[in-house]
Image (cartoon, helix red, strand yellow):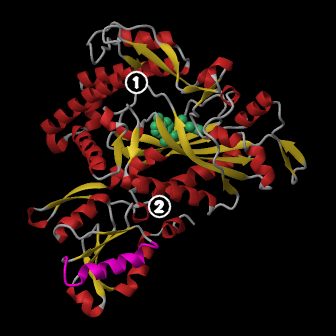
Amino acid sequence: MAQQEDVFKKIIAHSKEYGFVFPSSEIYDGLSAVYDYGQNGVELKNNIKRYWWEAMTLLHENIVGIDSAIFMHPTIWKASGHVDAFNDPLIDNRDSKKRYRADVLIEDHIAKIDDKINKEVEKARKRFGESFDEEMFCQTNARVKEHKDHREALHQRFSDAMNDNDLKALRQIIIDEEIVDPISGTKNWTEVRQFNLMFRTEMGSTADGAMTVYLRPETAQGIFVNYLNVQKTGRMRIPFGIAQIGKAFRNEIVARQFIFRMREFEQMEMQFFVRPGDEMKWFGYWKEWRLRWHKALGLGDDKYRYHDHEKLAHYANAATDIEFRMPFGFKEVEGIHSRTNFDLSQHEKFSGKKIQYFDPELNQSYTPYVIETSIGVDRMFLSVLCSSYEEQKLEGGDSRVVLHLPAALAPVKCAVMPLVRKDGLPEKAREIVDDLKFDFSTHYDEKDSIGKRYRRQDAVGTPYCITVDHQTLEDNTVTLRHRDSMEQERVAIADLHKLIHDRVSLNSLLRKLK
Ligand code: GAP
């Protein structure tokens, strides 16, 4: 685990060094849990968004997109339940004056018990060697059994307290387990309070009774309140979907793990409106289809798993997460939820407007049911980055850092390099750039040795390097170097376009989803 943490630190440093992600407001010492995307990061992020958008809107003729405003009427958040129930349980330490999420303090404490168990197991594995039977050891070793029983009971108590929203019980766990503040080292805790995660601001002049508005904590509500507009103007027939990509804001108290949990982030959400009674069929469809979308990127099928929710929100009748194996464990990247007709019904109630669909086949009106797919752009970015990063030892004692980014998502598709900065080679290389740049993000690089230039491109995940040498001037061929294998092939300049296109286009990725 410690090794994985080291790798994660290196990935964070790498993404800063190579212009993927910068801490926000860095020259003012940063702003916690807010990040900026650099010159390579923005390209990678845009490619991820395009892959999602086109998979939704091009491959499904019954899905259309919108772009709703971030500010919305505040009653929307009353209707959706966010004003009353979008909360985290908070606790303060009176000595350090620091604030924590009570549930996270307990989760971290449980993780420490897991560590103790793992340490015992690893010690025993070393002692017994080949003949080690982990299951048997865990069942019979007194110390491990004690830790496991303790963990299980604690986990049950914790789940009950969270499910019942019982703040007193959460605090009691912290007291009973003697959890200390990591900064002050004391147990001087306040009561646990609920803290709403929405950012508020004022709209209009304060003197004149300004209106409190919220920065949206999810993009989904912008879709629900536009359901009628889109259905009517697009003459959409159920089942149909509305997709949206946009910023969302949450005042996260525990913000950590780099861009995994941010205060300002981006979501890609799609609400699929279906007939009541058909929702489980469509839930199954989207659960399978979304995983296929992820796997088509080729990051490794073993890196994904579903996490079906046992405890459902009061409005949902099924929910699952797609989790990805990050360096810090399997974590949620996407949620697929069957939200019944909760949201549309709430907006009917709060707005007083009828939000119904007349189904010509059934000859009846109803409030549609909804299947939602909701994925964080930044978490997707992080999963792509983490699984692409590799430190490679090469023959001859050399080494390189390479990002094996899926070619269709890579910020730069090819780099053109004259072998030397003379003899007409730069001019020839520029000619190639001037042709390729209309279709691919193409870089020109003539500084440093060719080896150093290759390393620079490997570090940002450029799939192809094209080298122009003296032979090029004679026969119009170049070397095409492949990022992952480092193999080089001699190809005609006239064939470059097709060769690159076949391997880097979004089109070929989308075709895998057929
Ligand atoms: N409309 C449903 C909804 O918002 P969610 O599970 O709260 O559901 C959906 O969020 C996705 O948004 C998550 O799976 C995650 O990828 C992303 N997300 C949520 N909070 C985030 C945060 N603070 N930072 C980065 N991504 C976040």
Q: Which residues are magenta?
A: 421-439
- Disc on the earlier residue, 2 or 1: 1
Is residue 438 magenta-colored?
Answer: yes
Residue 145, given in percent of the width and then of the height, sits at: 29, 23
Q: Is residue 97 visible?
A: yes
**Residue 476 location (% of width, % of height):** 31, 89
C-alpha distance separating marks 2 and 1 = 34 Å
Question: Camera-side residue: 67 or 114?
Answer: 67
Image x and y of residue 127, in percent: 13, 36
Residue 161 percent across, percent down from the top left: 50, 17
Query: Is 105 drawn above or below residue 288 in the view shown?
Result: above
How many C-alpha atoms fall within 10 Å of the one at disc 2: few (<14), some, or many (≥20)? some
Q: Residue furthest left?
A: 396
Magenta span: predominant SS is helix
> Which element type, helix, strand or loop, lies under badge 1?
helix
Q: Quadrant of residue 337?
A: top right
Residue at (60, 57) in percent of width and height: 56
Q: Is residue 445 above or below residue 84?
A: below
Instruction: Indicate the secondary structure of the residue bearing disc 2.
Output: loop
Task: Report if residue 468 is visible in the image.
Answer: no
- In the picture of the structure, the residue carrying the numbered disc 2 is 296
Q: Amino acid at mark 2?
A: Ala
Query: Where, by quadrant of the figure, is residue 26 drawn?
Result: top left
- Numbered mark located on residue 104 in the image: 1
